Image: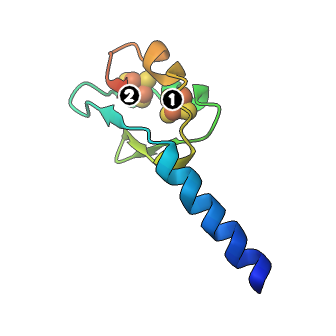
Amino acid sequence: MGIGSLFRRKKKDKKEEVEECHIDINSDDCDGCEKCIIACPNNVLMLKDDITAVRDPQVCKSCKVCMAICPNDCITVN
Ligand code: SF4
Ligand code: SF4
C-alpha cells in the first residue's frame, strides 16, 4: 500500500493500454477438449459450461498457440 502501490498500479494500467489482445472463441464448434487451456503458457483460458472462455485477456501475449492447437479452429487471436 502507500505511494509505492499507487505507482505500480499506474504503470500496469499504461501497459494494458499498449498491449491489446482480442480473442474470439466460436463456442458453437468448441467441444471442450481443453487442449487450448492446457497449451496456453499464460493461463488465459478456462473451461466454463463445457466450452472455452477467456479468463483474463490482459495476460494474453498473442502467441497464438491456442489457435494452432485447436482441432476445431474455434479460436482467433488478433
Ligand atoms: S494467444 Fe497465447 S497467450 Fe493468448 S490465449 Fe492463446 S495461447 Fe494463451
Ligand atoms: S482446443 Fe478448441 S475445441 Fe478444444 S477446448 Fe479449446 S477452443 Fe474448444
Secondary structure under the numbered disc 2 in the rendered image: loop
Q: Is residue 76 left or right of residue 69?
A: left
**Residue depicted at x 25% and y 30%:** 26
The residue that disc 2 covers is 78
Q: Is residue 63 left or right of residue 51?
A: right
Q: Is residue 32 above or below residue 44?
A: above
Q: Amino acid at mark 1?
A: Ser
Residue that lies at the very extreme toward the left in this rendered image? 28
Counting every numbered tag in the picture gives: 2
Q: Position of residue 72 (x, y in %)?
A: 33, 15
Q: Tell me if mark 2 has few (under 14), some (14-19) or many (20+) residues whose alpha carbon lies within 10 angstroms of its own.
A: few
The residue that disc 1 covers is 62
Residue situated in front as seen by the camera: 67 or 77 = 77
Q: Is residue 1 above or below residue 77?
A: below
Q: Is residue 67 left or right of residue 60?
A: left
Does any portion of residue 56 appear in the rendered image? no
Residue situated in front as seen by the camera: 61 or 26 = 61
Q: Where is the C terminus found, in terms of image quarters? A: top left
Does any portion of residue 74 appear in the rendered image? yes
Q: Is residue 11 left or right of residue 68?
A: right
Residue situated in front as seen by the camera: 49 or 41 = 41
**Residue depicted at x 65% and y 61%:** 11
Confirm if mark 1 falls within 8 A of ligand 1.
yes
Q: Amino acid at mark 2?
A: Asn
Q: Position of residue 74 (x, y in %)?
A: 31, 23
* Residue 43 image-quadrant placement: top right
Q: Position of residue 46 (x, y in %)?
A: 48, 43
